[in-house]
Image (spheres, helix red, strand yellow):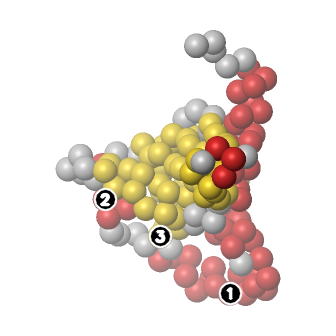
Amino acid sequence: MRPMRKANRQRNSDWASEVFDKAPYITVSMMRPDGTPYGLPLSLVRKDDSTFYFHCADEGEKIDCLNANPTVSLSAVSKCTPRYEEENNNFTEYFHSAVAIGKAEKVTDEAEKIEALRLLCERFLPKQMEHFDEAVNRSLGRTTVIRITLLEPPVGKCKP
């Protein structure tokens, strides 16, 4: 198998990032302290080429997993269309998907927490941004924000 050229890798990485941006949820897979896998769909937002955020409570299984092992896998599907191709007598599925590996860590800087929460709200509730400042003032102290920094560029696949 021939290695992917740098330009192709960048195009694939850019395309995979778009899949993450369009997906309504991104599955974050992690490892429990006992070594068993744990994955769940979360509402993530991408800040730049290598940074994602999500928010959660400061306790629970996600936090236990990330404290034990901060390495996570991200996966997303932004388009999925099952089809029957009559001419080939074939069942298939057309899809756009992306995966990435990253390191998760709790955000401790207040300004970064607010920025991450703003990005999340702008992505998922852009028409309610007039309530953002009041909500952040009320709940910032009890909200945990997790930053995922990619360890390598994301990759994507599709069957258009």
The three-letter amino acid code for the residue at tag 2 is Asp
Depth check: give the residue in front, 90 or 104. Answer: 90
Foreground pick, 78 / 113: 78
Q: Secondary structure at mark 1?
A: helix
Position in image of residue 137 (x %, y %): 63, 82
Q: Residue at x 44, y 46 (%)?
A: 72
Q: How many marks?
A: 3
Circle 2 sits on which residue? 64
Mark 1 → mark 3, Cα distance in angstroms: 18 Å
Residue 106's x, y, as percent?
A: 48, 56
Say which amino acid is labelled 3.
Cys
Decide: few, some or many residues near mark 3? Use Cα within 10 Å; few <14, some 14-19, many ≥20: some
Dot 3 falls on a residue whose secondary structure is strand
Q: The residue tagged with tag 2: helix, strand or loop?
A: helix
Residue visible at 62% across and 55% down? Answer: 84
Q: Nearer the viewer, residue 7 or 102?
A: 7
Inspect this view and state whether residue 132 appears.
Answer: yes
Q: How far apart are labels 3 and 2 at the CA level?
A: 12 Å
Can you identify the residue that label 1 sits on?
134
Residue drawn at point x = 56 percent, y = 76 percent:
140
Label 1 or label 3, whichever comes before in sequence order: 3
Circle nearer the N terminus (2, 1) = 2
Which mark is drawn over residue 47?
none
Q: Nearer the viewer, mark 1 or mark 3?
A: 3
Looking at the rendering, in which quadrant would you find the N terminus? top right
Query: Residue 100: image x %, image y %?
Result: 55, 41
Q: Is residue 56 left or right of residue 79?
A: left
Which residue position holds label 3? 56
Q: Are marks 1 and 3 in contact (CB under 8 Å)?
A: no
